[in-house]
Structures are given as structure tokens and as C-alpha cells.
Amino acid sequence: MAGFLDNFHWPEYECIDWGERRNAVASVVTGILFFTAVVYRRPEQLNHAFHTCGVFPTLAFFIIKMLYPMLRTGAWVWLFIGFVSMFGVLIASMWILFGAYVTQPL
């Protein structure tokens, strides 16, 4: 994902230098797209179990990103815990979302 916008050329303006702000602009655009995807018109439509699909992957990403201060053996165990939790969250999110949308009667 690091080279996602390498071949995309921003409009050339003399007053704005897009080259160094590429990642910031991509982060803002993805944040806006995520915000528009999760907005509900009625709060009662949102099942509270859906929050787990976002909270636990964030915690697992923090677990994986905190590798650098650990020793070698501890880092392998910590990385394993992070990836197992990511896989568990993936399975749990499929279970929650299929249970909410697929198994509902028409």
C-alpha cells in the first residue's frame, strides 16, 4: 500500500506542493470515505455488536506495531498473538455480519 499513489499525478499548482503531502491527503480521503460508509440515519439500525468489528482490529494493529521494544523471543510470541487476534477478529466479524444480514427473514 505504500506505493498506492505513486502513478497518480496531482494537478500541478505552483502554490501547492502535493509531493510531500501525498500520504496526508490519502489519509483524509479514506477517512471521509469511511465516515460516509458508517453513518446511519437512525441510531437504532446499528447493532452494538458491529462496534467489535472495528475496535478489536485496532487493538490487534497496536499489538503488531509495538514489536520494536521487545527481545527476539518476546517479539515472535507478541507477533503471533497479534496475528491470531487479527484472524479471530476476521472470523468474528464474518459471524456478526452474516448473522445480522444473511440469516434475517425476508
Image: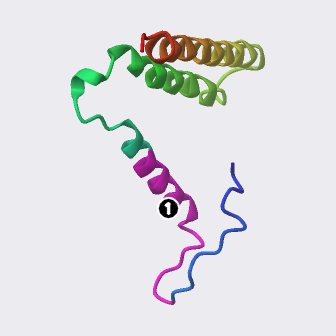
Q: Position of residue 18 (x, y in %)?
A: 55, 74
Q: For the image shown, how many numbered marks are present on the structure?
A: 1
Q: Is residue 87 left or right of residue 41?
A: right
Q: Quadrant of residue 95?
A: top right
Give amino acid for label 1.
Val
| Residue at the outermost bottom position | 14
Q: Is residue 90 left or right of residue 38?
A: right
Q: Position of residue 99 (x, y in %)?
A: 48, 10
Q: Position of residue 46 (x, y in %)?
A: 31, 23
| Residue at the outermost front position | 106
- Identify the residue shown where x is 48% and y is 81%: 16
User: Tell me, what colour scheme is on the image?
Assistant: rainbow
Q: Quadrant of residue 50?
A: top left
- Identify the residue shown where x is 72% and y is 57%: 3
Q: Is residue 11 left or right of residue 40?
A: right
Pick the quarter of the image with the C terminus. Answer: top left
| In the image, residue 103 lies in the stretch drawn in magenta | no
- Identify the residue shown where x is 50% and y is 59%: 24
Mark 1, other Cα within 10 Å: few <14 / some 14–19 / many ≥20: few
Magenta part of the protein: which range?
14-33
Q: Is residue 92 above or below residue 10?
A: above
Q: Which residue is mark 1?
A: 25
Nearest to the observer: residue 26 or residue 103 = 103
Q: Position of residue 1 (x, y in %)?
A: 69, 48
Dominant secondary structure of the residues highlighted in magenta in the image: helix
| In the image, residue 17 lies in the stretch drawn in magenta | yes
Q: Secondary structure at mark 1?
A: helix
Q: Is residue 45 left or right of residue 1?
A: left
Q: Is residue 23 above or below residue 61?
A: below
